[in-house]
Image: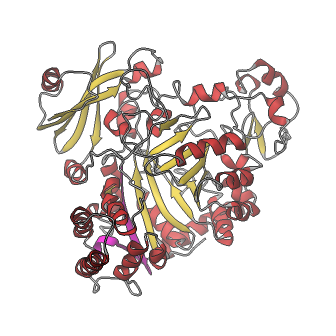
């Protein structure tokens, strides 16, 4: 058993703690720091850390922790112990961040001194910038859905650029991928200008949206693509109105708009136990039917923020292995559990690229328990996992050995030797007899590795579906070790950069604080060039109750009567006749049964 440096106990006390709180464990894995949900809910100002043991029992990985004030908390960490150990084999303990944005006084306390502090060990792989907290939906499981009386937060383009630049300036590897998020970013009528501004800092821009706006405004997809959006990340929780009330009716039109604009899409389902976990394979099939525009599916097991009864939490809790096995079962074994790899498994690719090209490539060093991924090739009406024709384990080990054996810069003779070894390893690990027709993966990958870009894999990606799994934490399953290795971060207008699971799990310390500090009044917002009031009596919107609009009295007065602010005191209303609903149902049915694109 290991004892984390962040465990609020000595090693001797940690061993005693583990044996007392989990006496029936088959195996103790570690004692580390965590959070007490009750303390988080109460927004305690003192130290929030409590000791937590992670252990194996009944073929599951479980956790147990104790708060002196609120007692024991138990939950499941990973439902499948064997899959956990397989992921852990790729664990990486090295430090991949040479700079910090925030220097707290004394020894930093994780996760309450984030910014990024010197204790953080991963550079920003994906930088999030929240461009608004307005949203025309109210999804109960959303990180941002806490209450509707928040102040209006909508940073200026200059502030957004500074947040992106802070993450891009990290050493030794700066972030080059920014996700514009919210709220609902497309409610900003200057969103194309926001994209162009961020494009001055980074090359890759993702837009996180519910997609409904693109269904209503088909020209928006063209505008976003032209402005510089590389990928649209859109919610998609299921293939019927019950599992996906968010955008079931709008998604076909939204995808058509993206197809016409040549704007790639990644579907992002929030997986909730007992609600949509039976439809994961259908979601993949829907994506495969639209492979020309849908480039991947990134599943997110729900983060259960806020207080809730134990029985409700256990019913809704989904771990990464739960989702992976649901996909395996739903695809009749076409995408097996052993086809998935944890995020840090790609580090050997980064190491080899640094050796060959003498320049750093992204080092995705997130904790092994944060997420897993694979690729499935769409071969007519079947899904072929990449592991069916590539020995991924052997290939990654070979790259790791090459990076360890040689040092940069490579001389001419050494470069020839490395190139020959690389070609041989690709010949050895790719089973050409099992490759789908027209797939030449070894040749394509060799071109990409030698060039240090993904250009060589363009042909593969035409029919390859990325499948990802990212489980953001909540106060119940919080693991400080994971936070210190987080590679998905938020930029803040005050210059700090905060890990995702600090920003959203401790909103009173990060998200809400910054939104309050940089909030603007409605009258000030309406003076902006792009801002526009909305007819609050229009047929396609609904007015919120005046007492839930905003905590600011002056804004309540301004919005109580007359025009409103879309997504703030006015929400979207859906109005479809029966014939339109029937057409949309038929569209989904053809996609799932015949792989016909929408």
- Whether 7 is drawn above or below 381: the answer is above
Q: Position of residue 450 (x, y in %)?
A: 39, 75
* Left or right of residue 295: residue 515: right
Query: Which quadrant of the rendered structure holds the C terminus?
Result: bottom right
- Whether 558 is drawn above or below 350: the answer is above
Q: Residue at x 44, y 81 (%)?
A: 380
Q: Position of residue 345 (x, y in %)?
A: 30, 58
Q: Residue at x 71, y 31 (%)?
A: 152
Q: Is residue 452 magenta?
A: no
Q: Nearer the viewer, residue 424 or 561?
A: 424
Q: Is residue 376 magenta?
A: yes
* Left or right of residue 334: residue 15: left
Q: Position of residue 379 (x, y in %)?
A: 42, 80
* Left or right of residue 221: residue 302: left
**Residue 183 showing in the rendered view:** no
Quadrant of the image occupied by residue 4: top left
Which range of residues does the magenta coloring cover? 371-388
Furthest-right residue in this view: 562
**Residue 281 showing in the rendered view:** yes
Q: Nearer the viewer, residue 592 or 107?
A: 107
- Whether 138 is drawn above or below 443: the answer is above
Q: Position of residue 19 (x, y in %)?
A: 12, 25
* Left or right of residue 559: residue 511: left
């Amino acid at each position: 058993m290991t004892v984390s440096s962040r465990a609020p106990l000595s090693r001797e006390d940690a061993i005693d703690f583990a044996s007392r709180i989990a006496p029936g464990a088959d195996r103790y894995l570690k004692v580390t720091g965590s959070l007490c949900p009750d303390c988080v809910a109460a927004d305690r100002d003192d130290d929030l850390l409590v000791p937590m043991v992670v252990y194996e029992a009944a073929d599951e990985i479980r956790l147990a922790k104790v708060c002196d004030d609120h007692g024991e908390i138990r939950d499941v960490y990973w439902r499948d112990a064997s899959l956990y150990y397989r992921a852990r084999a790729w664990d990486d303990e090295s430090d991949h961040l040479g700079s910090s944005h925030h220097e707290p006084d004394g020894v930093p306390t994780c996760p309450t001194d984030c910014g990024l502090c010197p204790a953080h060990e991963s550079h920003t792989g994906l930088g999030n910038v929240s461009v608004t907290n307005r949203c025309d939906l109210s999804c109960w499981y959303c990180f941002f859905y806490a209450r509707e009386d928040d102040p209006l937060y909508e940073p200026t383009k200059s502030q957004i650029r500074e947040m992106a630049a802070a993450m891009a300036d990290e050493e030794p590897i700066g972030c080059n991928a920014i996700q514009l998020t919210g709220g609902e970013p497309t409610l900003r009528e200057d969103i194309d200008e926001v994209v162009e501004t961020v494009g001055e800092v980074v090359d890759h821009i993702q837009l996180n949206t519910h997609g409904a706006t693109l269904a209503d405004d088909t020209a928006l997809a063209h505008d976003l693509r032209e402005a510089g959006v590389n990928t649209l990340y859109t919610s998609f929780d299921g293939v019927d109105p019950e599992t996906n009330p968010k955008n079931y009716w709008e998604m076909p039109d939204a995808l058509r708009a993206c197809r016409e604009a040549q704007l790639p899409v990644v579907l992002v389902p929030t997986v909730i136990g007992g609600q949509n976990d039976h439809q994961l394979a259908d979601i993949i099939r829907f994506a495969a039917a639209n492979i020309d525009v849908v480039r991947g599916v990134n599943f997110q097991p729900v983060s259960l923020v806020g207080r809730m009864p134990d029985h409700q939490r256990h019913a809704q809790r989904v771990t990464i292995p739960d989702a992976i096995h649901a996909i395996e079962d739903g695809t009749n074994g076409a995408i097996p559990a052993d086809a998935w790899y944890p995020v840090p498994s790609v580090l050997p690719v980064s190491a080899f690229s640094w050796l060959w090209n003498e320049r750093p490539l992204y080092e995705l060093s997130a904790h092994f328990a944060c997420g897993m991924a694979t690729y499935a090739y769409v071969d007519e009406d079947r899904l072929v996992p990449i592991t069916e024709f590539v020995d991924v384990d052997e290939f990654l080990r070979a790259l790791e050995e090459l990076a360890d054996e040689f040092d940069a810069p490579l001389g001419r003779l050494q470069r020839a030797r490395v190139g020959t070894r690389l070609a041989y390893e690709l010949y050895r690990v790719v089973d050409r007899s099992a490759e789908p027709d027209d797939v030449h993966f070894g040749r394509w990958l060799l071109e990409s590795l030698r060039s240090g870009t993904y250009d060589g894999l363009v042909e593969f990606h035409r029919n390859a579906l990325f499948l990802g799994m990212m489980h953001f934490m909540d106060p119940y399953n919080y693991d400080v070790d994971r936070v210190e290795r987080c590679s998905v971060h938020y930029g803040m207008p005050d210059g700090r950069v905060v890990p995702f699971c600090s920003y959203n799990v401790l909103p009173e310390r990060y998200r809400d604080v910054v939104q309050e500090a940089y909030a603007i009044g409605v009258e000030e917002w309406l003076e902006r060039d792009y801002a526009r009031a909305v007819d609050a009596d229009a047929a396609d919107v609904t007015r919120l109750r005046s007492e839930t609009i905003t905590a600011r009295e002056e804004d309540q007065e301004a919005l109580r009567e007359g025009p409103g602010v879309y997504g703030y005191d006015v929400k979207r209303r859906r109005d479809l006749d029966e014939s339109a609903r029937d057409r949309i149902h038929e569209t989904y049915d053809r996609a799932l049964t015949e792989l016909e694109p929408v």
